[in-house]
Image: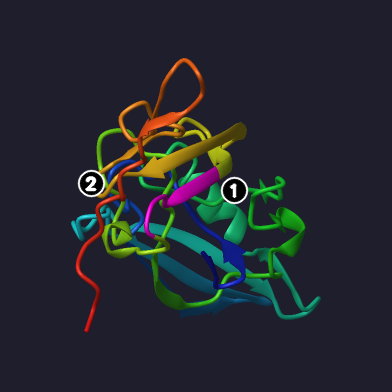
């Protein structure tokens, strides 16, 4: 999620559900002026994916009115405060081949107020369960396939090569081709039992 002049990323990766329903709010308010320096309070509030509020984080922002620069921009300070956080981080680089293309050079000169929700983030394939909303897909009479090139790791967000194809059988993702849903072929290569139709939910009227 890009907001307020920087970039935010959930720590958890998707599994059997969308884990990234995280709310972020940043409020920047003027506090006082001392000499040539304007002081601001940066208050960062956030929830986990269940909507449970997490401890508020407050950092400082300073603006040098004489030299017209931010001596403390709030971005660096909040990034440091979120280092090691179990819910959300502010990565300095997410420019991998499957990343957002964001790098720390994209940071604005200072953080600004914002409010938003981090959505999506589902990682495939999923073993033994259905990802959110994918039980309504209907792409053909037999196969629904997903090709996964890369996924990220829960530990530090590094992208790793997956290069796998998963098959949706109506209730879960399985390896493709699956022995359960492949046609039975005899020793001569003739199809004895054809591939069954992949079960799908009723079409939406």
* Residue for point 46% across, 48% down: 145
Q: Quadrant of the C terminus?
A: bottom left
Q: Is 193 in front, or is 177?
A: 193
- Residue 113 shown left or right of residue 34 in the figure: left
Q: Which residue is mark 1?
A: 91
Q: What's drawn in magenta, residue-wise?
A: 141-147
Q: Is 192 in front, or is 134?
A: 192
Q: Where is residue 133, by image quadrant?
A: bottom left
Q: Which residue is mark 2?
A: 171
**Farthest top residue in view:** 187
Count residues near mark 2 (Cα–Cα under 10 Å), then give few for <14, some for 14-19, many for 20+.
Answer: some
Question: Which numbered marker is on residue 38?
Answer: none
What percent of the width, then of the height, locates residue 201? 21, 63
What percent of the width, then of the height, locates residue 101? 71, 57
Q: Is 124 in front, or is 6?
A: 124
Quick one: label 2 or label 1, which is nearer the N terminus?
A: 1
Q: Label 2, secondary structure: give it.
A: loop
Q: Where is residue 39, by image quadrant?
A: bottom right
> Is any atom of residue 13 visible in this view?
no
- Residue 107 shown left or right of residue 22 in the figure: right
- Residue depth check, mark 2 versus mark 1: number of the one nearer the observer: 2
Count residues near mark 1 (Cα–Cα under 10 Å), then give few for <14, some for 14-19, many for 20+.
Answer: some
Q: Tell me: residue 47, above or below residue 30.
A: above
What percent of the width, then of the height, locates residue 196? 30, 44
**Is 144 covered by the magenta stretch?**
yes
- The CA distance from mark 2 to mark 1 is 35 Å
* Residue for point 44% across, 43% down: 124
Q: Where is residue 26, by image quadrant?
A: bottom left
* Residue for point 50% across, 19% down: 188
Q: Is 179 in front, or is 157?
A: 179
């Amino acid at each position: 999620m890009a907001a307020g002049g920087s970039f935010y990323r959930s720590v958890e990766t998707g599994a059997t559900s969308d884990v990234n329903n995280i709310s972020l709010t940043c409020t920047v308010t003027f506090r006082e002026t001392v000499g040539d320096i304007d002081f601001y309070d940066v208050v960062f509030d956030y929830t986990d994916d269940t909507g449970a509020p997490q401890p508020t984080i407050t950092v400082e922002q300073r603006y040098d009115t004489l030299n017209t620069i931010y001596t403390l921009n709030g971005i660096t300070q909040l990034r440091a405060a979120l280092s090691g956080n179990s819910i959300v981080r502010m990565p300095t680089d997410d420019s991998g081949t499957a990343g957002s293309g964001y790098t720390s050079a994209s940071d604005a000169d200072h953080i600004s107020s914002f409010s938003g929700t981090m959505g999506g983030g589902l990682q495939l394939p999923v073993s033994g369960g259905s990802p959110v909303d994918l039980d309504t897909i209907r792409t053909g009479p037999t196969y629904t396939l997903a090709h996964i090139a890369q996924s990220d790791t829960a530990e530090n967000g590094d992208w790793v090569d997956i290069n796998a194809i998963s098959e949706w059988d109506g209730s879960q993702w399985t390896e493709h081709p699956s022995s359960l849903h492949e046609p039975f072929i005899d020793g001569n290569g003739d199809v004895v039992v054809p591939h069954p139709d992949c079960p799908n939910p009723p079409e939406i009227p």
